[in-house]
Amino acid sequence: MRMLLMAIGGAVVSGFSTGAAADVAAGNACAAHLSPLALEIYRATAPALRTDTVIRELLSAKVRPMVMSGQVAPGPAREAARAAGHCLSALRS
């Protein structure tokens, strides 16, 4: 099941084309080096990324509920969000 979700997530990220200046190759290359948690965050947020999106707000909207529900501790969540944010910036450039 997890592999299926990862494949679907990869297809969503690979199909990212809504931004006029999206660099899918750079985003995917960056994401290949992410931790599992950071990759989950990246895949959950990449489809919502637009040229005018504030990446920090987008990440907060995804990560805050994960922390509040106890799914992940604040420290690891913060680190993973920073890493995912770096890749989202690469994707948007």
Image: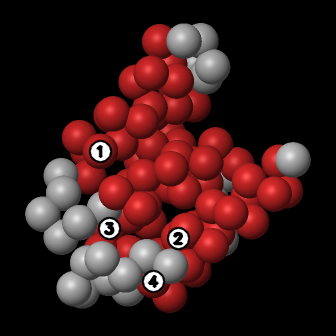
Instruction: Nearest to the eye among marks 4 and 2: give it.
Output: 2
- Which residue in the structure is indicated by mark 4? 24
Tag shown at residue 89: 3
Tell me the distance, in whole angstroms, between the alpha carbons under discs 3 and 4: 11 Å
Tell me the distance, in whole angstroms, between the alpha carbons under discs 4 and 1: 18 Å
Q: Is residue 85 left or right of residue 80?
A: left
Q: Is residue 73 left or right of residue 93?
A: right
Within-10-Å neighbours for mark 2: few <14, some 14–19, many 20+: many
Q: Earlier in the sequence, mark 4 or mark 1?
A: 4
Tell me the distance, in whole angstroms, between the alpha carbons under discs 4 and 2: 8 Å
Figure quadrant of residue 9: bottom right
- Which residue in the structure is indicated by mark 2? 13
Report the residue at 44% width, 32% height from top: 63
Q: Secondary structure at mark 2?
A: helix
Q: Quadrant of the C terminus?
A: bottom left
Asked whether 15 or 54 is in front, the reply is 15
Report the residue at 34% width, 57% height from top: 48
Q: Earlier in the sequence, mark 2 or mark 1?
A: 2
Report the residue at 18% width, 52% height from top: 54
Q: Position of residue 24 (x, y in %)?
A: 45, 83
